[in-house]
Amino acid sequence: MTHRQDDLYVRYMSAFSASRTHTSDCERCQNSQDCIVGTPLHERFARLQDAYNTQQSRQPRR
């Protein structure tokens, strides 16, 4: 894994953790409702997840 790949993975996992932590304490997010704090966290996680999945799909299979 290159440094750039490592950085994306770390940001992706950090966003996942922030999203998960927020959701565990937010009743609105637990019920799939918009929340002023949670929405940007969940959107960031989704963007980074998409970027990571795209990166992985472009990697040669071993």
Image (spheres, rainbow, N blue to C red):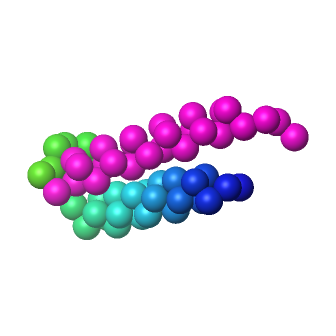
Magenta span main SS: helix
Give the image location of residue 25, x and y in percent.
25, 67
Does residue 29 appear anywhere in the picture? no
Give the image location of residue 39, x and y in percent.
22, 47
Residue nearest the observer in this picture, 24 or 12: 12
Q: Residue at x 58, y 54 (%)?
A: 4
The image quadrant where one finds the N terminus is bottom right
> Is 12 situated above or below 49?
below
Q: Is residue 57 magenta?
A: yes
Q: Residue at x 62, y 59 (%)?
A: 3
Q: Residue at x 57, y 34 (%)?
A: 54
- The span picked out in magenta is 37-62
Q: Residue at x 28, y 63 (%)?
A: 22
> Is 45 situated above or below 60?
below
Viewed as shown, does residue 15 lie left or right of 40? right
The image quadrant where one finds the C terminus is top right
Give the image location of residue 16, x and y in percent.
43, 57
Residue that protrudes farthest toward the front in the picture? 3
